[in-house]
């Protein structure tokens, strides 16, 4: 005899699998945005560009984090770590020695 009025229960392992797949999808999207960091030539360009801006502006490298890496340019966030509110500013730059860091719209 079937009980009426009770909704069927979803097993916990199905909920776990759904949450796990969602987290994998989110992480894969983030990794795709910075995939250039894992290619040797691109990684050297990114490291050199970040080091150049850190030296020019007097920033710490730990205050810079790349957010988007393309073949020609990169976006990175600068966040100075102080007590209280830390302002984050987004910058775009090409990989050339003379390319300035231009502010972009932060997300």
Image (cartoon, rainbow, N blue to C red):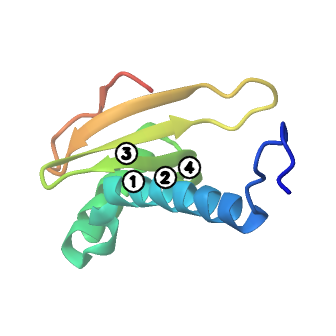
Label 1–label 2 contact, CB within 8 A: yes
Relative image position of residue 45 (x, y in whole percent):
24, 63
Query: In this view of the protein, which residue sits in the foreground, 43 or 19?
Result: 19
Residue tagged by mark 4? 60
Crowd rating for badge 3 (residues with CA inside 10 Å; few <14, some 14–19, many 20+): some
State the residue at coordinates (23%, 34%).
100
N-terminal-most mark, 1 or 4: 1
Q: Secondary structure at mark 3?
A: helix
Residue tagged by mark 2? 26
N-terminal-most mark, 3 or 2: 2
- The relative height of residue 70 versus residue 47 in the rendered view (above or below) is above
Q: Tell me the distance, in whole angstroms, between the alpha carbons under discs 3 and 2.
A: 30 Å
Query: In this view of the protein, which residue sits in the foreground, 101 or 85?
Result: 85
- Numbered label attached to residue 57: none
Foreground tag (3 vs 1): 1
Residue tagged by mark 1? 29
């Amino acid at each position: 005899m079937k009980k009426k009025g009770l909704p069927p229960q979803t097993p916990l392992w199905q909920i776990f699998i759904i949450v796990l797949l969602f987290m994998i999808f989110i992480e894969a999207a983030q990794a795709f945005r910075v995939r250039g960091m894992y290619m040797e030539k691109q990684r050297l360009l990114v490291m050199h560009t970040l080091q150049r801006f850190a030296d020019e502006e007097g920033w710490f490298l730990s205050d810079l984090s790349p957010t988007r890496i393309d073949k020609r340019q990169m976006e990175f966030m600068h966040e100075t770590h102080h007590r209280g509110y830390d302002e984050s500013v987004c910058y775009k730059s090409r990989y050339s020695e003379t390319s300035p860091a231009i502010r972009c719209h932060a997300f």
